[in-house]
Amino acid sequence: MGVLRAGLCPGLTQDMVQLLQSRGIKTVVDLVCADLEEVAQKCGLSYKAGALQRIQVVRAFDIFQMLDVLQDLRGAVSQQVSSSSGTLKVVVVDSVAAVVAPLLGGQQREGLALMMQLARELKTLARDLSVAVLVTNHMTRDRDSGQLKPALGRSWSFVPSTRLLLDSTQSSGSLGSRRVVCLTKSPRLPTGCQETVDLGSLGTPEQSPVFQGDHT
């Protein structure tokens, strides 16, 4: 049974350990089994605020700025001394179509090459730094069939290893916060499975009392 000690996980200082011990949380098992939000309230802490402070937002308005940001990020993280408190966990690009779409079509022949360069940079970032890379895209309608399809064309469809389609529900007649998430591409799981989520409560309908008994 592991005893809590400073440095065991990010943010766990000696003062924090003493504070937790005064509340009866003395071992790793005690901490894992505890309700973290309740613990934070009892100890006068804001673990949510601490997590939000670790999020860094960088604005890039074209693909060249995006590539510069990703290359700088990869270089900076690679040079850092390995430590649990400074480890990069996830990179979110929202949205990739905003910086790529203006380069496609017409006489801009370099657009496809730049898009694939961005794809290589994202894959390299994920592989070299072992981080999750989340990229948002938008949907368009096929000119001939009218069917919905991911933007950026067939070339980009091979880039993500896992793809989730997020769609609104129409049952209530208004957009609301409910979405249907469908797995359309995965290297490990069967595709086609769906789950209705409530973005307002950040949980599935089973976890949201408002939507109990009403599933997709």
Image (cartoon, rainbow, N blue to C red):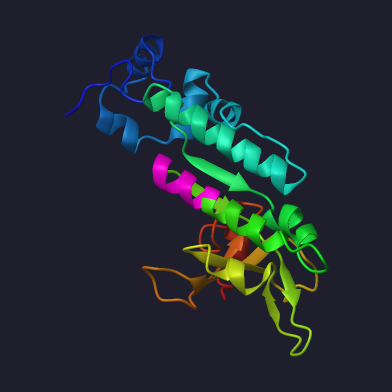
Q: Is residue 144 left or right of residue 33?
A: right
Residue 144, quarter of picture:
bottom right
As drawn, which residue projects farthest toward the left? 1
Q: Give the prevailing secondary structure in the magenta stretch.
A: helix
Q: How many marks?
A: 0
Magenta part of the chain: 121-129
Q: Quadrant of the N terminus?
A: top left
Q: Is residue 91 magenta?
A: no
- Residue 212, compared with residue 52, is above or below; it is below
- 16 vs 104, nearest the viewer: 104
x, y percentage for residue 59?
73, 38
Q: Is residue 139 visible?
A: yes
Q: Is residue 182 left or right of residue 98?
A: left
Identify the residue at horizontal 53%, vertical 49% (top origin). Answer: 122
x, y percentage for residue 80?
43, 23
As drawn, which residue projects farthest toward the right? 106
Q: Is residue 38 visible?
A: no
- 185 vs 126, nearest the viewer: 126
Q: Is residue 155 left or right of residue 40?
A: right
x, y percentage for residue 131?
44, 43
x, y percentage for residue 128?
40, 42
Q: Quadrant of the C terminus?
A: bottom right
As drawn, which residue projects farthest toward the bottom? 145
Q: Is residue 127 magenta?
A: yes
- 152 vs 188, nearest the viewer: 152
- 168 vs 33, nearest the viewer: 168
Identify the residue at horizontal 67%, vertical 55% (top origin). Answer: 96
